[in-house]
Image (tube, grey):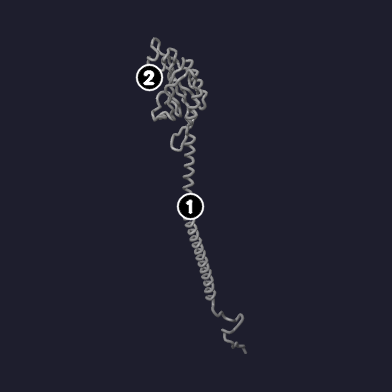
Amino acid sequence: MRPVNLIPAEERRGQNAPLRTGPIAYIVLGALVALLAAVTLVVLTNNQIADRKVELAQVKREDAATAAKAQQLSAYTDYQLLSEQRATTVKSLADSRFDWERVMRELSLVLPDDVWLTSLNASASPGTSAGGESGGGGLRGSVAGPALEISGCATGQKGVAGFIGALKDMDGVTRVGVESSALPPVGTAAGTGEGGGATDCRTRNFIAQFSLVIAFDAAPVPTTEGEVAVATAEPEAAEGSEEEPAAEASEG
């Protein structure tokens, strides 16, 4: 007789047990795993984006707080900058001031007994003078910095030359220009020659009348507000008069 298995096919075990679900179950399982991985990736990405947004918001808040603090402190920064600019300007103006009092004191010390002055004009630049008058003519126009314009008389050309040598010994003097130095014209009564009258101090035939320009080229000169420059010496400093040769040339 042939044996017959009376156990239902769905309850059998072993090699003879038929597939209960088939390959569909594995396909579904693989799809679920892939879906889970995709959902996990999306969740992680969303969490990362949310963290970045939180960090960005925090950075923006910190930036706004820093900008507000900088705005509050800007007044102190502006004041510091203004203070430095004013200090620089004051220092420049102080450096550019010229000590005329010292110059006058030294001039009085070096003035010889045989020389007397009839005119003295002090100016810081060629276009201005202490009296507000223009001082830019003649040799004065060639001196960019402070200068003295002196007119007077001396006992002869030798006295004029000695006075020029004394002027060169003054502190700060870089050159002395002679605009004119002349004795009275021959055959003319003293004090009545050309350029005579109240301004002619040649009361004797041996007295020479001179006009000098004393330059202080090394002194700092203000050019614009808060700026200081140093005057430069001109190559030619003195010219002689037509009547008499110049007593001295300039000192460069």
Q: Name the residue type under label 2.
A: Ala
Where is residue 215 drawn, in percent x and y?
47, 26
Where is residue 96 drawn, in percent x and y?
47, 34
The residue that label 2 is drawn on is 198
The residue that label 1 is drawn on is 73
Q: Quadrant of residue 135?
A: top left
- Tell me the quarter of the image containing the N terminus: bottom right
Q: Name the residue type under label 1.
A: Leu
User: Residue 197, relative to residue 37: is it above or below?
Assistant: above
Q: Residue at x 50, y 64 (%)?
A: 50
Label 1 or label 2, whichever lies nearer to me, is 2
Q: Nearer the viewer, residue 85 or 163?
A: 163
User: Residue 33, relative to residue 166: is it above or below?
Assistant: below
Q: Secondary structure at mark 1?
A: helix
Where is residue 168 drawn, in percent x and y?
51, 23
| Residue sitting at the far bottom | 1
Where is residue 188 drawn, in percent x and y?
38, 11
Nearer-N-terminus badge (1/2) = 1
Q: Nearer the viewer, residue 62 or 83?
A: 83
Q: Nearer the viewer, residue 30 or 216?
A: 216
Name the side, left or right, on which 9 lies relative to 208.
right
Q: Secondary structure at mark 2?
A: helix
Q: Alpha-carbon distance for marks 1 and 2?
A: 69 Å
Q: Nearer the viewer, residue 165 or 175?
A: 165
